[in-house]
Amino acid sequence: MELREVIGWRRSIRFLLLHKPVELEKIQCMLEAARIASHWGNVQSLRALVIYRDEASQDVLDALPSPVGGYQIQLAPVVIVWYIETAAVDQIVDRLRELLEVGAIGFGESKAKAFDEKLVPLFKAMGDATKVPGIGEIDCGQGIAQATLMAFEQGLGTCCLGTANPDRIRRKLDLPESCRVLLVQTVGYPAESPEAGGQRPRLPFEGLFQLNRYDQPFPRSKEVVEELERDGMLQDPAPLPWREAELEYLRKGLGLKGDGLL
Ligand SMILES: Cc1cc2nc3c(=O)[nH]c(=O)nc-3n(C[C@H](O)[C@H](O)[C@H](O)COP(=O)(O)O)c2cc1C
């Protein structure tokens, strides 16, 4: 699959095949993709605890959130707890120096001197300010997004689940205090069709992006849209006519109770 197609097929898959094992290698590929994502200062604060339901203790399983429609967690053979290690930024100077030494940043004969005299004081002055929720989360999001695309490229389905009480999960999973749980991602082979009811609704393009000036919407070319449709990135919007029938099939087949919301 081309990247455009992978992006097109990526959507939150909430119904997974609990009985179909997920290869450890596929999860490794997700983590490899997350590891090479971009991160400010190259400090790599994104971490993950991978939980295989069949192998985990009841204590660990109990630590997972009960998200909206808790069935998502119950149907997941694998759950990835993504978290940020805020202490990673303490290594900022060393990690930047590494970038300098491999030729990724800076140029010219005096670059090492400029690094010590200008860049190092700048980053040292930031102190702990970069440990609060903000830029680190953006970087972690990039890593999680790369891992998610890798999952779909390998035929897996995932759904990111937020939690109202990340610190409870952190404590229950024995993660250090310097860590913040970001989100929990269910992973498994999809029980639903790849379309999963169609591409989910989005706000109109024109209202989201601007070109050069805030009052100037970014022009959306019809030709580009048609090309992306041909490539499978932009797909038929939800709901496909047979979605309700599919949901009913999933509900019965997976033995789900209730309305799947609260
Ligand atoms: C950070 C994050 C947290 C989310 N939390 C939840 C959640 O708690 N429950 C849920 O059903 N979906 C959750 N989602 C999935 C979104 O609801 C989903 O992205 C949205 O429905 C758009 O659909 P799509 O991902 O299928 O395109 C979350 C997504 C993200 C990125």
Image (cartoon, rainbow, N blue to C red):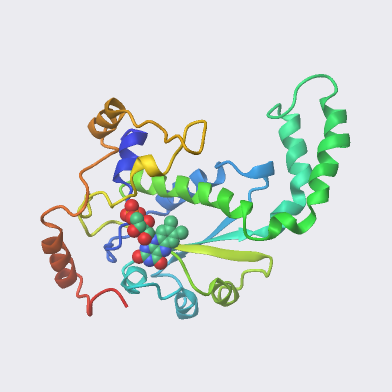
In the rendered view, tell whether residue 29 sits above or below residue 176.
Answer: above
The quarter of the displayed image where residue 55 is located: bottom left
246 vs 49, left or right, is: left
Tell which residue pokes out farthest to the front in this image. 215
* Quarter that holds the C terminus: bottom left
Q: Can residue 186 be seen at all in this image of the molecule? A: no
* Quarter that holds the N terminus: top left
Location of residue 35 in the rendering, given as x and y in whole percent from the top left corner: 56, 46
Q: Residue at x 46, y 73 (%)?
A: 64
In the rendered view, tell whether residue 145 sits above or below residue 61.
Answer: above
Location of residue 22 in the rendering, given as x and y in whole percent from the top left corner: 35, 57
- Point out the quarter of the image occupied by ligand 1: bottom left
The quarter of the displayed image where residue 72 is located: bottom left
| Relative depth, front residue between 209 and 86 | 209
The quarter of the displayed image where residue 121 is located: top right
193 vs 56, left or right, is: left
Q: Residue at x 25, y 30 (%)?
A: 226
213 vs 21, left or right, is: right
Location of residue 235 in the rendering, given as x and y in whole percent from the top left corner: 24, 42
Location of residue 49 in the rendering, given as x and y in whole percent from the top left corner: 53, 62
Q: Residue at x 74, y 36 (%)?
A: 98
Number of numbered discs visible in the structure rendering: 0
Q: Can residue 60 be seen at all in this image of the molecule? A: yes
Q: Residue at x 58, y 56 (%)?
A: 47
Tell which residue pokes out farthest to the top in this image. 108
